[in-house]
Amino acid sequence: MAKTGGKGFSLAKRFYTSRTLGLALGLVCVSAAMYPLDPAPWVWALMLLNGLLWPHLAYQWSRRSPVPYHAEYRNLLVDAFLGGFWVAAMQFNPLPSATTISMMAMNNVAIGGLRFLLVGSVVQIFGMGAGMLIFTPLFIAQTSQLQLYACLPLLCLYPLALGWICFRQADTLGRHKRELLALSRTDSLTGLLNHGAWKDQLEVEFQRCHRTHQGGAIALIDIDHFKTINDTYGHVAGDIVLRQLSKMLKQNLRATDVAGRYGGDEFCVILPDLPLSSAALVMDALRDRFATLGYEQSPALKVSLSIGLAAFNPAHSDATLWLNDADQALYEAKSTGRNRVICCGDGKPRRELLDPV
């Protein structure tokens, strides 16, 4: 409920700003057109109510509604009806009437597109019909100089304000879209790239290496006996281990390196422009530091890493083959005792082993 209320407050506030300004400027325009007609006191009272009080009433109605969008939809229909009513009340004076209709049409398009423009136009016609029944207009065909100047603030200031509001809304939506995109590419537990996003980056790096004839390496990292850690010390302890490894990756890799969570207890790293021997030293240093970590919640908990490394092979036609090389090296690291780094050579049938002393 609090979340819905927050959204409702934001929506109501956005409409409140444009409605307050538009109706205040509209009051000046309509008053200048109505003054020569010597309207009854109740007409003046209705003008003041519509121009000065209605924006605040509409704001509270929308803000307190359980479905703010529906409340604002009704508010906008009230605006459209009253706009049509005042066009008839002004005896269809050309410039004030055209200004009122065009500003409301612009507002409806900005808020609800073509569909709401059509709905608002129909409601405006009903408002004109009600005004014609009450005022029996004479269709004044001339606009005075005073009325012309009274229309200028609405013509000049309201489109500027509405444009600014639309820009702010588009900017907010764009930011939210970027945030959602970032969340969709990020692993929620570790803050690293998720499986799909990292593989996208691997494809980019593979194409870059082919295009520039530069080398690089990738690493697959597995936390040894992670299931046993979860079963013995609990999933909370397991999550702490995962987060600690992701923290070490962020702190110890270069800015150009790309780390991700491949899935479960497996992590992955792209090491651009780094020879396999240098990448092996980096990964072995990571393995060594990780093995010395102490965990306050479980002092007896011991952890280690098995790491498979593979260099870019220009003979490969697909990034998946590069990844398969690293996966084979990781399998060998796990099957030959774990807690070690094994490198799959760059196209050579040899294996380079970094085993802990």
Image: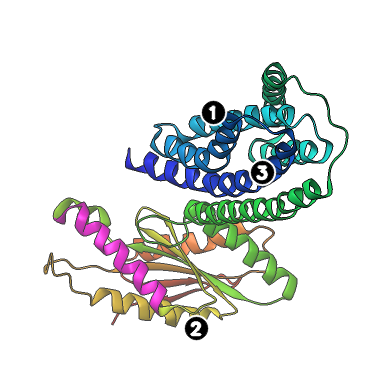
- Magenta: predominant secondary structure element? helix
Q: CA distance from mark 1 to mark 3?
A: 20 Å
Q: Which residue is mark 1?
A: 74
Q: Position of residue 272 (x, y in %)?
A: 58, 75
Of circles 2 and 1, the one toward us is 1
Of circles 3 and 2, the one toward us is 3
Q: Position of residue 228 (x, y in %)?
A: 21, 54
Residue at image position (77%, 40%) is: 96
The reply to whether residue 166 is in sight is: yes
What is the three-letter code of the residue carrying label 3?
Gly
Asked if the magenta segment contains residue 249, the reply would be yes
Mark 2 or 1 closer to N-term? Answer: 1
In the rendered view of the protein, which quadrant contains the C terminus?
A: bottom left
Q: Position of residue 163 (x, y in %)?
A: 68, 53
The residues colored magenta run: 233-251
Mark 1 or 3 closer to N-term? Answer: 3
Q: Tags 2 and 1 in contact by the CB under 8 Å rule? A: no
Q: Secondary structure at mark 2?
A: helix
Left or right side of 8 for 2: left
Residue 26, which numbered label? 3
Q: Which residue is mark 2?
A: 278
Judge by depth and name the residue closer to the eye, 69 or 344: 69
Q: Secondary structure at mark 1?
A: helix
Residue at image position (50%, 64%) is: 326
Residue 322, which numbered label? none
Q: Position of residue 192 (x, y in %)?
A: 43, 62
Q: Tell me if mark 1 has few (under 14), some (14-19) or many (20+) residues whose alpha carbon lies within 10 angstroms of its own.
A: some
Residue at image position (33%, 75%) is: 287
Judge by depth and name the residue closer to the eye, 178 or 34: 34
Residue at image position (88%, 33%) is: 141
In the rendered view of the protein, which quadrant contains the N terminus?
A: top left
Q: Quadrant of residue 204?
A: bottom right
